[in-house]
Amino acid sequence: MKIKSAEFEISAVRPGQWPDDGLPEFAFVGRSNVGKSSLLNRLLGRKSLARVSQKPGKTQQINFFRINEQFRFADLPGYGYAAVSKADRARFAKMMETYLTSREPLVRVFQLVDIRHPPMPMDIEVNEWMRRNGLAVTVVATKLDKVGKSHQAKAVRLIRTEMNKPESIRPVSSEKGQGIDELWSEIETLVAT
Ligand code: GDP
């Protein structure tokens, strides 16, 4: 995919602020620190379009990016950050739920998990919830460069079993670039259909 333009559009809190031109949209979800900003920056070939590691859990908005005037990425806030209050967590869950169940142009959700560890209960819960709600989900296993070659297949198998056999799992490294072209191919295909 050739990125001709990638623009940050808005940090939205309320549905009324979401872009409404109907461009096909891809959402990125995952625990804080899973590598979501790094992946977005890598995909878009920008160093800091999506900010890397500002205070985890602090961003409670959905960030929208318009790409090639053709489709859009929605960067959802990282979930499962322990230091936010119960009220914040509830507000966050509600926002995520509202977005995921009502966003019409949403084509697919990319749920990020860290390939180095078995998925956390929260990852499994969110995955189950999305599938129950009929969402199309690709699990993206991040930080591939951090596991040795001989452990990669095993790590992917563990994620597959723990997450109850998701439709697809894509190992990627934002640092080294593995899996990025494949992820773009998936997005391109979905934009074209
Ligand atoms: P976010 O909170 O999900 O947006 O995560 P960040 O993108 O800020 O990444 C969290 C940490 O993981 C940072 O220190 C990144 O440099 C690191 N990281 C993210 N992706 C990769 C990767 O593919 N490989 C390696 N080695 N580190 C990564």
Image: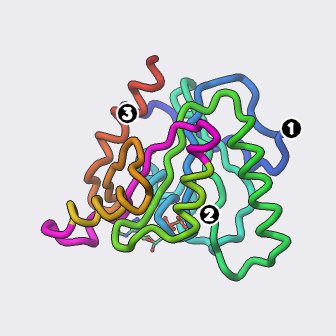
The spot of residue 156 in percent (x, y) is: 29, 59
- Pointer 2 residue Cβ closer than 8 Å to ligand 1: yes
Q: Quadrant of the N terminus?
A: top left
Q: Which residues are magenta?
A: 130-151
Foreground of the two, 19 or 186: 186
* Disc 2 target residue: 78
Foreground of the two, 86 or 178: 86
Residue 186: which disc?
Answer: 3
Question: Farthest residue toward the bottom?
Answer: 83
Q: Are marks 1 and 3 in contact (CB under 8 Å)?
A: no
Q: Secondary structure at mark 1?
A: helix
Residue at position x 51%, y 28% in the image: 68
* Disc 1 target residue: 16
Indicate the quadrant where residue 26 lies.
top right
Q: Secondary structure at mark 3?
A: helix
Kind of residue at badge 2: Gly
In the image, ligand 1 is in what quadrant? bottom left
Kind of residue at badge 1: Gly
